[in-house]
Amino acid sequence: MREFANEPINCFFAPIGYALAVRIDWDKYHVRLAEIGRTRWMKGVEQDPTWQNETVATRHTIWFIWAGQGEMHFRGGWHPLRAGRCVWLRPDGWHYDAKQNPADTSGCEFHSVRSRE
């Protein structure tokens, strides 16, 4: 088994300077794709009507931002979103808010998974 601690990893969407080895007992967990999609928010608006303020994630979802600019509010505050960024939305009561630059609409691909022990 290869160790990844403190080894640089180049991710297609963003360079990652370090990684920690995580060992998962896959016999204990069952992970299945729940939803896959691609979307582009409406032009000329700061927030797409399909997105609600303070959305609570109901399952683990990965966003791959492929177009536009915006920002997302996490527990630690607002963080920029732009093409090439990857965002992990976590359940467990986390609230998210997202806004885009109305002149540079956001596009993202998303992958949601459901898991159970």
Image: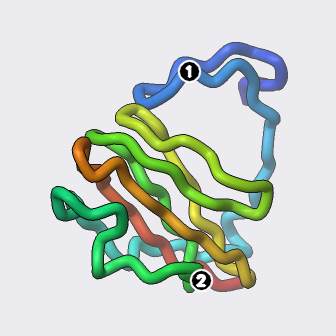
Q: Disc count in the image? A: 2
The quarter of the rendered structure image containing the N terminus is top right
Label 2's element? Answer: strand
Q: Which residue is mark 1?
A: 15
Residue found at x 43% / y 47%: 70
Determine which quarter of the picture holds residue 26. bottom right
**How far from the left and from the top, in percent, is residue 30?**
59, 76
Relative to 93, does residue 96 appear above or below in the rendering?
Answer: above
Q: Nearer the viewer, residue 116 or 52?
A: 52
Q: Label 2 amino acid?
A: Val
Determine which quarter of the picture holds residue 94. bottom right
Q: Which residue is mark 2?
A: 56
Residue found at x 67% / y 74%: 29
| Viewer can see residue 107 | no
The quarter of the rendered structure image containing the C terminus is bottom right
Q: Label 1 amino acid?
A: Pro
**How far from the left and from the top, in percent, is residue 109?**
30, 55
Give the CA distance from mark 2 to mark 1: 28 Å
Label 1's element? Answer: strand
Relative to 35, does residue 80 appear above or below in the rendering?
Answer: above
**How far from the left and from the top, in percent, is residue 107?**
26, 51
**How far from the left and from the top, in percent, is residue 99?**
44, 60
Residue found at x 25% / y 42%: 104
Give the class, few, some or many, for how many residues have Cα within 10 Å of label 2's Cα (few <14, many ≥20).
some
| Viewer can see residue 48 | yes
